[in-house]
Amino acid sequence: MSTSKKINVSHAFHQCLDQETRRLKISYKEYLEAAGEFFIARKIDPRKYQAGQTEEFAHLLRLAVDRISSLIVFQEQQILKTIHTEASKARIMGELSVNHLLRLLTEDEKSLLALQQQDQQYLTQRLRKVTEQLSATKLTSQSHATTTKKTNS
């Protein structure tokens, strides 16, 4: 059902309305109904609405999402670094245990102290290598994140 109403508008607004309806090839009725639905659906006061607010909001939202993504990546890297370090320690300790068993089968008790010292040196060496690998991986991923951030900006 359609109701007919007469609305008085300024001459300048009428000219703008006329231009836009011609450009969009729609009637005044369709244009004004769409404009009204826009404000009603969003519960926006049309007197306070400023064009460009949505673009500014979208930009701020993109910045917030980028910050959150960067934080998540950083946290993942820290967690993965910890997990990788612990897994490496477990693997190294497994290697040491096998080494101990093989040596103990072939040597006497006097060599146990020497074996423990060798194991400590081996553990220190392996952990240093793992840490260096993690640092290299971290630098590479930070470089990639910085490049990605610059590209998105």
Image (spheres, grey):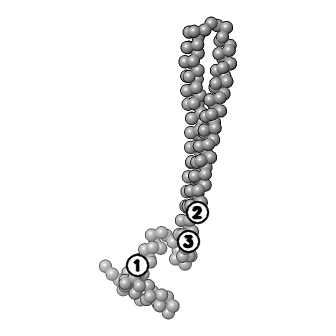
For the residue marked with disc 3, what is the amino acid?
Gln
Q: Position of residue 70 (x, y in %)?
A: 58, 52
> Which residue lies most toward the front here?
106
Residue situated in front as seen by the camera: 29 or 72: 72
In contact (CB < 8 Å): disc 1 and disc 3? no
Q: Residue at x 52, y 77 (%)?
A: 46
For label 1, count other residues whose C-alpha is less than 10 Å away and answer few (under 14), some (14-19) or many (20+).
few
Residue situated in front as seen by the camera: 5 or 83: 83
Task: Classify 138 as above or below 98.
Answer: below
Which image quadrant is residue 32 in?
A: bottom left
Q: Label 3's element?
A: helix
Q: Label 1's element?
A: helix
Residue with the mark numbered 2: 153
Task: Classify 8 as above or below 104.
Answer: below
Label 3, label 2: how far apart the Cα atoms are: 19 Å
**Closer mark to the observer between disc 1 and disc 2:** 2
Label 1, label 3: how far apart the Cα atoms are: 22 Å
Q: Which mark is residue 33?
A: 1
Residue with the mark numbered 3: 53
Q: Position of residue 107 (x, y in %)?
A: 60, 8
**Closer mark to the observer between disc 1 and disc 3:** 3
